[in-house]
Image (spheres, rainbow, N blue to C red):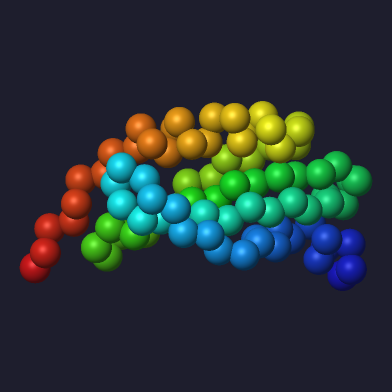
Protein backbone atom coordinates (compact mmCIF):
# COMPACT_ATOMS: atom_id res chain seq x y z
CA UNK A 1 0.00 0.00 0.00
CA UNK A 2 2.85 2.40 0.81
CA UNK A 3 4.43 1.79 -2.62
CA UNK A 4 1.11 2.37 -4.37
CA UNK A 5 0.60 5.61 -2.46
CA UNK A 6 3.97 6.88 -3.77
CA UNK A 7 2.66 6.45 -7.31
CA UNK A 8 -0.26 8.84 -6.67
CA UNK A 9 0.41 12.35 -7.89
CA UNK A 10 -0.03 14.89 -5.10
CA UNK A 11 -0.61 18.26 -6.70
CA UNK A 12 1.03 21.28 -5.14
CA UNK A 13 -0.54 24.55 -4.02
CA UNK A 14 -2.85 26.32 -6.44
CA UNK A 15 -1.59 29.44 -8.19
CA UNK A 16 -3.91 31.65 -10.22
CA UNK A 17 -2.50 33.05 -13.45
CA UNK A 18 -3.89 35.40 -16.09
CA UNK A 19 -4.05 34.08 -19.64
CA UNK A 20 -5.62 35.63 -22.75
CA UNK A 21 -8.74 33.53 -22.01
CA UNK A 22 -8.93 34.77 -18.40
CA UNK A 23 -7.84 33.66 -14.95
CA UNK A 24 -6.98 29.96 -14.58
CA UNK A 25 -5.66 27.71 -11.81
CA UNK A 26 -2.13 26.29 -12.16
CA UNK A 27 -0.49 23.54 -10.09
CA UNK A 28 2.87 21.78 -10.21
CA UNK A 29 3.56 18.32 -8.87
CA UNK A 30 6.47 15.95 -8.68
CA UNK A 31 6.19 12.36 -7.53
CA UNK A 32 8.40 9.30 -7.35
CA UNK A 33 6.96 6.31 -9.14
CA UNK A 34 7.15 2.76 -7.83
CA UNK A 35 9.97 1.97 -10.28
CA UNK A 36 12.02 4.86 -8.83
CA UNK A 37 11.46 7.19 -11.77
CA UNK A 38 10.19 10.70 -11.23
CA UNK A 39 7.09 12.16 -12.83
CA UNK A 40 6.65 15.92 -13.10
CA UNK A 41 3.36 17.57 -14.05
CA UNK A 42 2.05 21.05 -14.58
CA UNK A 43 -1.74 21.13 -14.44
CA UNK A 44 -3.97 23.99 -15.59
CA UNK A 45 -7.68 24.01 -14.75
CA UNK A 46 -9.85 26.17 -16.98
CA UNK A 47 -13.52 26.70 -16.10
CA UNK A 48 -15.85 27.81 -18.88
CA UNK A 49 -19.46 27.87 -17.74
CA UNK A 50 -20.35 24.30 -16.81
CA UNK A 51 -17.32 22.91 -18.65
CA UNK A 52 -14.04 22.21 -16.87
CA UNK A 53 -10.86 21.68 -18.89
CA UNK A 54 -7.88 19.97 -17.30
CA UNK A 55 -4.69 20.61 -19.32
CA UNK A 56 -1.65 18.59 -18.23
CA UNK A 57 1.98 18.88 -19.21
CA UNK A 58 3.72 15.70 -18.06
CA UNK A 59 7.31 14.49 -18.30
CA UNK A 60 9.64 11.92 -16.83
CA UNK A 61 12.57 14.04 -18.05
CA UNK A 62 13.79 17.27 -16.47
CA UNK A 63 10.93 19.60 -15.44
CA UNK A 64 12.38 22.30 -17.69
CA UNK A 65 11.29 20.28 -20.74
CA UNK A 66 7.66 21.23 -20.06
CA UNK A 67 8.29 24.49 -18.19
CA UNK A 68 9.88 25.92 -21.35
CA UNK A 69 6.74 25.42 -23.45
CA UNK A 70 3.78 25.59 -21.06
CA UNK A 71 3.30 29.37 -21.09
CA UNK A 72 3.44 29.64 -24.88
CA UNK A 73 1.01 26.75 -25.31
CA UNK A 74 -1.44 28.08 -22.72
CA UNK A 75 -1.26 31.61 -24.16
CA UNK A 76 -2.32 30.14 -27.52
CA UNK A 77 -5.30 28.22 -26.05
CA UNK A 78 -8.64 29.51 -27.28
CA UNK A 79 -11.92 28.38 -25.80
CA UNK A 80 -15.16 29.99 -26.88
CA UNK A 81 -17.05 31.41 -23.89
CA UNK A 82 -19.89 29.22 -22.69
CA UNK A 83 -23.36 30.38 -23.65
CA UNK A 84 -25.36 31.61 -20.70
CA UNK A 85 -28.79 30.01 -20.31
Name the residue at the left extreme: 85
Residue 23 can be seen, yes or no: yes
Quarter of image, res 27: bottom right
Quarter of image, res 19: top left
Residue 28: x, y in percent?
63, 52
Residue 23: x, y in percent?
36, 56
Q: How many marks?
A: 0
Residue drawn 34% across the image and 59% down it? 47
Residue drawn 68% across the image and 54% down it? 29
Name the residue at the front extreme: 18
Residue 3: x, y in percent?
89, 62
Quarter of image, res 82: bottom left
44 and 16: which is toward the camera:
16
On the rendered structure, is 22 left or right of 28?
left
Residue drawn 70% across the image and 58% down it? 9
75 and 7: which is toward the camera:
75
Residue drawn 11% across the image and 64% down it? 84
Residue 60: x, y in percent?
75, 36
Asked if 67 appears above or below 1 in the picture, the reply is above
For the C terminus, the image quarter is: bottom left
Residue 46 can be seen, yes or no: no
On the rendered structure, is 81 left or right of 7?
left
For the N terminus, the image quarter is: bottom right
On the rendered structure, is 46 left or right of 83?
right
Amino acid sequence: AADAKQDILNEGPIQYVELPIGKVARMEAKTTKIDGGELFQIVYVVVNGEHIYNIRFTTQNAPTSVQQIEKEVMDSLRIKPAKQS
